[in-house]
Image: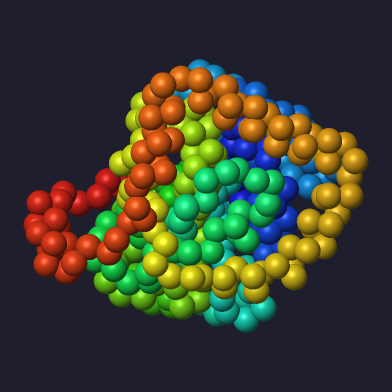
């Protein structure tokens, strides 16, 4: 089985080795990474990893018509590792596939749903939970508190990414789901969620979020770490968003994602698969230097950004802001009464 993950990055070199080792360990046979406008040496790290045969690096220079990530995915569509894959999935650097079933690999998840042509992996959003300082430690070990499995709001906490068979039913990769369906082929695709339920026919062509108010993580979940340390959030704000690049990150984004109610360390079951890949990557001297430079850049960039009042003010607000709290059912019903359906991506 050939499974390809597609990743878009900018100034994320400090987090790259952990993410790569984890997903190689799960059984992704190919990783296609697109980079743009990097200041921290991420592109140099990717060139080194490409030379080592660990991934495929595709530079993604501008102009980015339609947005950075959409331009990247369009470039990735033409890559042999995408075209020849049996399974495809688009991911972000702050997303970690977390498989609960069997031996915690992609093969085990696919074996658990043998009729599935597409599997939606719902976000489990992990909050900041008071971590102020950035440190060069694994994301999956630093942030272990998350949103409850079931809660009535917000729907953004239950968006999904899609692992799907590359049958030709969809012409294009998408941020959350495959795009440009071929009508007759797409109509035959059977979609399942990561709790093991077959999904209704409409999901074959639309939708980017799982039904909330019910469990979604029985077989697998997508650990989503959108905030990181407070210092990292300031740097992330400076980097900008890959999809909604005109929307600056602020306290609103933070408040909807700072979930700290539940301890979740289930991803540790995947660690034995990642360990040999992590050891191999860390043993490369050139890669070690580039990683250290990316860490140093991140620390220096935060210090530079804090010279601006708007960043100091936001950092102060992050220190003041409490974690998100679960909205009461009656309040959630009131919100849903005035909420338009979420956008299709």
Residue 316 lies, with reference to residue 222, above or below; the image says above
Relative image position of residue 36 (x, y in whole percent): 60, 27
**Closer-to-camera residue (167/265):** 265
In the picture provided, is 271 more to the left or to the right than 260?
Answer: right
**Closer-to-camera residue (313/71):** 313
Quarter of the figure with residue 56: top right
Relative image position of residue 40 (x, y in whole percent): 67, 28
Quarter of the figure with residue 299: top right
Residue pictured at 47% horizontal, 53% vertical: 130
**Closer-to-camera residue (94/86):** 94
Coloring basis for residues: rainbow
**Image quarter (top left, top right, bottom left or bottom right) of the N terminus:** bottom right
**Image quarter (top left, top right, bottom left or bottom right) of the C terminus:** top left
Report if residue 86 is visible in the image: no
Relative image position of residue 211 (x, y in whole percent): 29, 66
Number of dots carrying numbers: 0
Report if residue 212 is visible in the image: yes
**Closer-to-camera residue (316/170):** 316
Relative image position of residue 29 (x, y in whole percent): 72, 57
In the picture provided, is 249 more to the left or to the right than 301?
Answer: left
Quarter of the figure with residue 34: top right
Residue pictured at 62% horizontal, 81% vertical: 102
Residue pictured at 65% horizontal, 27% vertical: 300
């Amino acid at each position: 089985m050939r499974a390809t993950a597609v990743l878009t990055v900018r100034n994320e070199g400090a987090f790259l080795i952990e993410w790569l080792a984890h997903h190689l360990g799960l059984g992704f046979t190919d990783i296609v990474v697109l980079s743009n406008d990097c200041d921290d040496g991420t592109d140099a790290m990717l060139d080194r990893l490409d030379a080592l045969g660990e991934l495929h690096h595709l530079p993604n220079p501008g102009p980015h018509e339609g947005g950075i990530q959409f331009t990247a995915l369009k470039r990735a569509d033409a890559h042999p590792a995408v075209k020849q894959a049996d399974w495809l999935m688009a991911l972000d650097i702050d997303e970690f596939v977390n498989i609960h079933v069997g031996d915690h690999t992609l093969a085990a998840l696919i074996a658990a749903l043998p009729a599935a042509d597409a599997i939606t992996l719902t976000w489990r959003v992990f909050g900041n939970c008071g971590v102020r300082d950035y440190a060069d430690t694994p994301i999956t070990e630093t942030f272990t508190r998350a949103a409850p499995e079931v809660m009535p709001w917000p729907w953004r906490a239950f968006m999904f990414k899609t692992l799907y068979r590359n049958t030709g039913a969809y012409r294009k990769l998408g941020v959350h789901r495959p795009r440009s369906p071929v009508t007759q082929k797409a109509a035959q695709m059977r979609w399942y969620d990561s709790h093991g339920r077959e999904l209704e026919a409409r999901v074959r062509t639309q939708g980017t979020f799982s039904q909330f108010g019910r469990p979604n993580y029985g077989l697998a979940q997508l650990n989503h770490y959108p905030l990181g340390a407070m210092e990292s959030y300031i740097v992330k704000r400076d980097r900008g968003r890959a999809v909604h690049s005109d929307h600056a990150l602020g306290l609103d984004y933070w408040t909807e994602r700072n979930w700290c109610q539940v301890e979740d360390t289930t991803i540790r079951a995947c660690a034995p698969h990642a360990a040999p890949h992590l050891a191999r990557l860390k043993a490369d001297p050139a890669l070690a230097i580039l990683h250290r430079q990316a860490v140093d850049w991140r620390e220096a960039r935060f210090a530079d950004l804090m010279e601006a009042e708007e960043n100091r003010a936001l950092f102060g607000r992050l220190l003041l802001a409490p974690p998100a709290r679960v909205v009461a059912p009656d309040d959630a019903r009131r919100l849903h009464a005035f909420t338009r359906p979420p956008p299709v991506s």
